[in-house]
Image (spheres, helix red, strand yellow):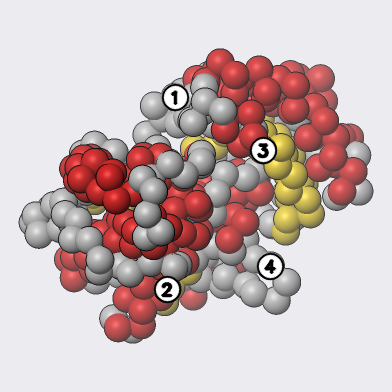
Amino acid sequence: MTILALETSCDETGAAIIVNGQIKSNILASQAKTHLKYGGVVPEVAAREHVLSIIPTINLALKKAKTKLAEIDYIAVTKGPGLMTSLMVGVDTAKTLGLTLNKPVLPINHLEAHIYANVAFDKLRQHKSLIPERSRRVKFPAIILIVSGGHTMLVLMRGHGQYKIIGETVDDAAGEAFDKTARLLGLPYPGGPHLSKLAKNGNPHAFKFPRPMINSDDLNFSFSGLKTAVLYEVQKLDSRFRGNGQRGKLKANLAASVQQAIVDVLIAKTEQAIKKYQPKTIMLGGGVAANDLLRARYKLLAKSYQLSVSIPPLKYCTDNAAMIGLAAHYKLLTTHYPDAEIVRSRLRPKRRSKLPTKTFVADPNLALA
Ligand code: KG4
Ligand code: ZN
């Protein structure tokens, strides 16, 4: 089963080839440099960049995987959530290819793909817990913390494709909190990785930032207050920031303290969810899952409750097309398309009537369901 997967939900143009659940290629044309001068993603600019990059990215993915277009069985594409005009480039490209190649196009939820990044493996590292062929060994229920630039949510998964959102942010996402506070510290876009790098030289206890909603008795998050607290602190310190030799140290301390506050909340809420839902596995997903401190603390949390833990390899945390293809692969294997009970691992699309027939459109607000 060969899948060409496309991802264009935000500012990365991605194309990947997945053959029988293995990543044969995963190409990313990043627009980070283009958006750098604006300090954030400009949707119209992002869409134009996707238009320019999508075909060369697909060609490169095919070439690297030594695969011909004629060998593709399915085309998977991010349907949403994301930026509407960016999504439309991927969806329209996928539909056009589907029409010309006479192959089915599978709409994929970007958040579900962040979850299924957990089945990506590098070299010998294999995540067995989610492999459907070994479904008797799947350790459900699982709890997944999805932390990206646009979303922060805790998801309870009782089986493949069965999602219940048990908590989410009431305002900013965790990635947004990283990006916005990084900007206050004068760090370039995208702020998360820069802030986390700077934090390595800082004292995480130097500043006492709020941990919003950490003690609330639901599983929701709030990060907008943190941003305001950092703004006040930066303003207070502005005179010290300007000029003296402590500037670098103060910035590193601020970065480390912000990171600590965000990660403390994420871990505390996941722990509350563990106590409430008694999962067997906990997983991470989304761009912020690339954060070193969060990865380390998440593993410790799993250990202290003796749970299985799964965290995607770094390059599959931030947006990429491989995770879209993997989500499609596992959806086909685990019967989440209408016809899927006949689907097995050596699935070939035989008759068009057995495949999803409904047409679809890009959906910027697509929910995880
Ligand atoms: O999943 P993603 O690539 O895109 C969305 O779906 O939003 O997530 C991007 C977010 C950005 O906010 C970025 O700053 C954050 O992930 N991020 C990080 C790190 N790497 C990426 N945040 C903290 N530490 C990192 N190392
Ligand atoms: Zn994402």
Disc 3 marks a residue whose amino acid type is Ser
Q: Amino acid at mark 2?
A: Ala
Between the C-alphas of marks 2 and 1, the distance is 32 Å
| First reached walking from the N terminus: tag 1 or tag 4 | 4
Provide residue 139's location: percent of width, then percent of height.
Answer: 42, 72
Residue 112 place in picture, x, y as percent: 47, 46
Which numbered disc flags the more N-terminal residue, 4 or 3? 3
How many angstroms separate mark 2 from mark 4 (CA)?
19 Å
The label on residue 296 is: 2
Q: Alpha carbon of mark 3 to alpha carbon of mark 2: how far?
A: 27 Å
Are the two marked residues, 1 and 3, in contact with CB atoms closer than 8 angstroms? no
Looking at the picture, tell me which residue is in the foreground, 104 or 77.
Answer: 77
Give the residue at mark 1: 364
Residue at 66% x, 38% y is 30
Disc 4 crowd rating (10 Å Cα; few below 14, some 14-19, many 20+) is few
Q: Nearer the viewer, residue 136 or 236?
A: 236
Number of numbered labels in the structure image: 4
Local secondary structure at mark 3: strand
Inter-mark Cα distance, 4 to 3: 21 Å
Q: Secondary structure at mark 2?
A: helix
The dot on residue 30 is 3
Q: Earlier in the sequence, mark 2 or mark 4?
A: 4
Residue 8 in sight in this render: no
Find disc 4 in the rendering and name its residue.
Answer: 122
